[in-house]
C-alpha cells in the first residue's frame, strides 16, 4: 500500500514540475499561435533541425512519414508531433502533464489534423493505454530519462511497436563533457550539489523560461553506452549516435560565449516552438565536438 502511495506521489511531482515548466517556457508562445504562425514556425523548426542534424531529421525521413502511425512519448509543447503531422503521419502524442497534452492537441486542431486521426492524450510512459504492435514508429526526445522507471518505459515502447517498426529515442549521455565536467565536477563537487542526494542531477537540470523555479525536477538520469545497450537489449538492432555539445553550458565562460554566440552567429527562429524563444545557432566546432563529447544519445532501434 505504501509503495502504491509513493508511486502516485512521485507521478504527481513529475506532473507538477513539468506543468510549471510548460507555463514558464511555452504558455505565452501558445497564446499567439495561429495556423499561419504555426506553419511558418514548423518550416523554421525543420530548418533548425537540419542545421543541427537532429534525430527528427537524420534518424527518420520526414518525406516517408505519410500514413505512418507514430507515437510520441512526451511531446513537450507538441512541436515535434506537429512537424510529423505536417508530413501526413497519423500521430498520437502522450504526456503525463495535462498542460502539454492540451498544447499538442491545439496544434493538431490548428493544422486540421485531428480529422486524419492525430490526437494528444494524457498517459504514463510506463503504462500506456494501447494494444500490442500498434505503431510503426515510436519517438521520444529527451523524456524517458525523467521517468520513474526508464527500463519499464522502454519495454512499453517495445510492446507497442509493430514487428519491423523502429523507435527513435534521445536519452542523456553519461559519456559526455557536460556530465563529467560541467555537472559532476563543477556543479556536483565544486558547488556541493552531490550533497543533495540521489537526485542531485534533477536539482540542476531542465528549468528555463520567464518564471522563477519553485519546484525541483523529480528525476534526471543519464546513461553510459553499456547501459543503453542493456536497456534496449530486446530490440533486434541498436544504432547509437552522440550529439549536442554546447559551449554556453560551461560554467563561468559559458555566459561570455553566449553573448558572443548571439552577436556573431545569431538566433534561429526555429527555437520558438521547442524552447519558447529563438535559439542561438551552434558553431561548426560545437557540432563537430557533439559527435564525440555530446550530451545526447540519439538511439535508433528496430523490433
Image (tube, rainbow, N blue to C red):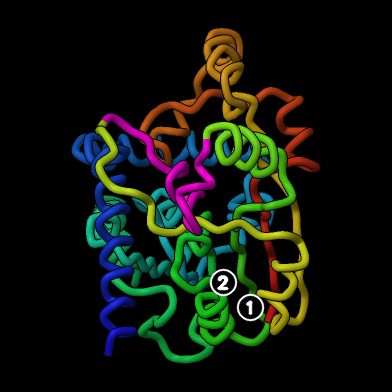
Q: Residues within 10 Å of mark 1 (few under 14, many from 20)?
A: some
**Where is mark 1, residue-wise?**
165
Query: In the orientation shown, which residue stands out farthest toward the left?
Result: 31
Q: From the viewer's perspective, is residue 249 above or below residue 205?
A: above
- Mark 2 is surrounded, within 10 Å at the Cα level, by few (under 14), some (14 to 19) or many (20 or more) other residues, namely many
The local secondary structure at tag 2 comes to: strand
Q: Are marks 1 and 2 in contact (CB under 8 Å)?
A: yes
| Residue 276, image x, y percentages | 36, 35
Does 202 lie within the magenta span?
yes
Tell me which corner region of the image, top left, top right, bottom left or bottom right, holds residue 114.
Answer: bottom left
User: Which quadrant of the rendered structure holds the N terminus?
Assistant: bottom left
Residue at numbered disc 2: 137
Point 32% across, 38% down: residue? 25
Q: Quarter of the image containing the C terminus?
A: bottom right
Q: Quadrant of residue 128?
A: bottom left
Residue numbers of the magenta segment:
192-210
Above or below residue 269? Residue 159 is below
Say if the magenta span includes residue 255: no
Amino acid at each position: 500500500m505504501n509503495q502504491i502511495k509513493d508511486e502516485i506521489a512521485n507521478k504527481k511531482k513529475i506532473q507538477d514540475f513539468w506543468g510549471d515548466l510548460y507555463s514558464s517556457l511555452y504558455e505565452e508562445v501558445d497564446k499567439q499561435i495561429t495556423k499561419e504562425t504555426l506553419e511558418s514556425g514548423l518550416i523554421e523548426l525543420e530548418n533548425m533541425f537540419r542545421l543541427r542534424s537532429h534525430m527528427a531529421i537524420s534518424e527518420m525521413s520526414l518525406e516517408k512519414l505519410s500514413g505512418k502511425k507514430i507515437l510520441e512519448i512526451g511531446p513537450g509543447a507538441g512541436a515535434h508531433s506537429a512537424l510529423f503531422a505536417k508530413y501526413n503521419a497519423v500521430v498520437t502524442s502522450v504526456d503525463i502533464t495535462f498542460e502539454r497534452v492540451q498544447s499538442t492537441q491545439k496544434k493538431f486542431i490548428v493544422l486540421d489534423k485531428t480529422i486524419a486521426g492525430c490526437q494528444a492524450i494524457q498517459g504514463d510512459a510506463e503504462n500506456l493505454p494501447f494494444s500490442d504492435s500498434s505503431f510503426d514508429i515510436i519517438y521520444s526526445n529527451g523524456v524517458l530519462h525523467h521517468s520513474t522507471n526508464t527500463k519499464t518505459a522502454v519495454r512499453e515502447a517495445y510492446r507497442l511497436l509493430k514487428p519491423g517498426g523502429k523507435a527513435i529515442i534521445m536519452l542523456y549521455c553519461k559519456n559526455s563533457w557536460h556530465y563529467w565536467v560541467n555537472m559532476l565536477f563543477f556543479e556536483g563537487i565544486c558547488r556541493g550539489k552531490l550533497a543533495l542526494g540521489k537526485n542531485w542531477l534533477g536539482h540542476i537540470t531542465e528549468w528555463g523560461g520567464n518564471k522563477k523555479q519553485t519546484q525541483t525536477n523529480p528525476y534526471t538520469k543519464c546513461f553510459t553506452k553499456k547501459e543503453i545497450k542493456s536497456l534496449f537489449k530486446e530490440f533486434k538492432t541498436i544504432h547509437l549516435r552522440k550529439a549536442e555539445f554546447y559551449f554556453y553550458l560551461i560554467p563561468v565562460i559559458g555566459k561570455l560565449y553566449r553573448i558572443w554566440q548571439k552577436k556573431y552567429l545569431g538566433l534561429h527562429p526555429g527555437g520558438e516552438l521547442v524552447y519558447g524563444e529563438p535559439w542561438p545557432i551552434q558553431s561548426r566546432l560545437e557540432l563537430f565536438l557533439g559527435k564525440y563529447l555530446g550530451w545526447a544519445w540519439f538511439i535508433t532501434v528496430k523490433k
